[in-house]
Amino acid sequence: MSMFCYQCQETAKGQGCTVRGVCGKTSDVSNLQDLLIYLLKGISLYSTEARKLGVENDKVNVFVMDVLFNTITNANFDKEFFINRVKEALEIRDDIKNAFVNAGGNVEKINHDSALWRSNDRDEIIEKSEKVGILQTENEDVRSLRELITYGIKGMAAYTEHAHNLSYEDKSIHGFMQEALAATLDDSLTADDLVALTLKTGEYGVKTMALLDEANTSTYGNPEITKVNIGTRNNPGILVSGHDLKDFEELLKQTEGSGVDVYTHSEMLPANYYPAFKKYDHFVGNYGNAWWKQDKEFESFNGVILMTTNCLVPPKASYRDRVYTTGAVGFEGLTHIEKDENGKKDFSQIIEHAKKCEAPIEIEKGEIVGGFAHDQVFKLADKVVDAVKTGAIKRFFVMAGCDGRMKSRNYYTEFADKLPNDTVILTAGCAKYKYNKLDLGDIGGIPRVLDAGQCNDSYSLAVIAMKLKEVFELEDINDLPISYNIAWYEQKAVIVLLALLHLGVKDIHLGPTLPAFLSPNVANVLVENFGIAGIGEVESDIEMFMNGTK
Ligand code: SF4
Ligand code: SF3
């Protein structure tokens, strides 16, 4: 075994990647990511104690958040980057240790290896990276809960970073992330303690998604019903993928008048729904589908691609020179656009490159409709409530989450297609690409697929559910005619799931497979307390949901 990673749904044999990631991550990179998470825990031991003495260190907050995001599935594959990150981690750890001591802290009581080990030697760093990791925790239930919390925190870090990029911050979220990381080293915590911490992670997940929602809507306006063009024009283009709206805005501004068009890909599609971006005539629409189709779609796009976050697939040689990264993303040999000292990103190199490219090859024509975040749905509330009261809408299906390569995910296309015509799908995240071009029609003008936006906009779906509960004067959110059939892939889906559990949502079905990191006992806790279940066959699942059984 040269590595061990089981953080995503596509993990090898549904158990763990042990030689090379199915995602393309090499064992070197996987081990270095493990070492970094280990060091973040060491940093967090100091910062959590220091915080109790009134020390808040912004450098630590930003570093922990950034590195967690770097280790999310399909974000960063660059070995040298991670070696440098390890060296930086040791410096940051020294800083916070000194601040702790200066505030009167007793450094003697912090004696975990993650807080003490150090080396600036490349070989020693690599050697250490092979010794630390997930399997260090021997008890499989404790390991399962520690990883569940860590993956939730990774998703939380990603959303925190997007809010941070728009200058929205809540220090308590940083405090919680570090406290939780430190807690995963604490051998005195029982499985029950860790279950409680898992639920608290969900509580902070809600806080984080609410903060990001506020950041996005205050900066760019509330998403509104939008017909998104999926065809192409004849100018060269830049295709922007990932989740970062600030990067998207910067690029739109800098491409104005350049003769280069801008398109969204995968999780950037919801940028089309924001009022602030509609004024740009060179913003054409969305090109292609979910992340995993990028090997074909980046090729036919012909222009330049900017990856602002995951999901990056190791690029093929045929289009590799046209892919640029920024933010948490990285890949050896690709140009990475950094912020300057004023926090601005200069995309002129990308724009000049794009000007020399051919226009995209059109792979689809027409329009898709989206923009159903909470504010827009509230504006339609009377219509929706009437439709439920008259029986025109029998049931809502939350089908948010992720898309992925596995054939078993065709379940979701078939499921959406076979749902009765009196049902409405509420979606967010890249899972929508499994059914957003099926022309499922509408119910009295309400489209049968309501897309709230990115995976973080799953928060919007929860807000909508809470509003419906209020309108129908129900005691319990679970009494609504809403079923949850969620597809997961990476760690952002983990924080979304934990957030929904915190809001009291029960009987969530999760697929296409349950996470490999859930031990049988931990899975049982989720089944017994929250009714979490997997998926079965399309027809019988639809029948079960429509009968209101779980
Ligand atoms: Fe395997 Fe997923 Fe980890 Fe990649 S992120 S190494 S596919 S478990
Ligand atoms: Fe997709 Fe990676 Fe999860 Fe944001 S882009 S939902 S998989």
Image (cartoon, grey):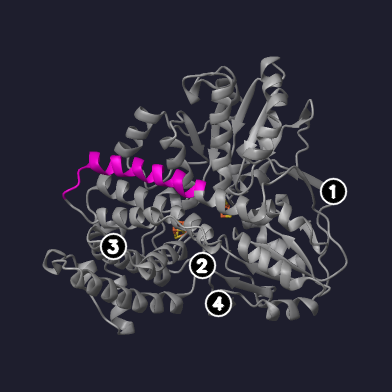
Q: Nearer the viewer, mark 4 or mark 2?
A: 4
Q: Are marks 1 and 4 in contact (CB under 8 Å)?
A: no
Question: To which residue does mark 1 refer?
Answer: 366
Say which amino acid is labelled 2: Ala
Q: Secondary structure at mark 3?
A: helix
Residue 11 seen in render:
no
- Residue 145, given in percent of the width and then of the height, sits at 31, 46
Residue drawn at (35%, 28%) of the image: 528
Residue that appears at 86% across and 63% down? 233
* Sequence-first tag of 4 and 2: 2
Look at the picture and state if 335 lies above or below 135. below
Q: Are marks 2 and 3 in contact (CB under 8 Å)?
A: no
Q: Nearer the viewer, mark 1 or mark 4?
A: 4
Residues at badges 3 and 1 in contact (C-beta under 8 Å)? Answer: no
Q: Which of the two residues, 42 or 438, is positioned nearer the viewer here?
A: 42
Q: Earlier in the sequence, mark 1 or mark 4?
A: 4
Residue 44 is marked as 3
Choose mark 2 or mark 1, whichever is in front.
2
In this rendering, the label closer to the viewer, 2 or 3: 3
Magenta segment, which residues? 188-210
Residue type at mark 3 is Ser
Amino acid type shown at disc 1 = Gly
Other residues around mark 1 within 10 Å, as few (<14) / some (14–19) / many (≥20): few
Query: 110 left or right of 181?
Result: left
Going from the N terminus, do you reach mark 3 or mark 1 first? Answer: 3
Q: Which residue position holds label 4? A: 342
> Mark 4 near ligand 2 (CB under 8 Å)?
no
Residue 158 location in percent, x, y? 48, 58
Q: Which residue is mark 2?
A: 328
Q: Is residue 153 left or right of residue 449?
A: left
- Sequence-earlier tag: 3 or 4: 3
Q: In terms of secondary structure, what is the magenta stretch mainly?
A: helix
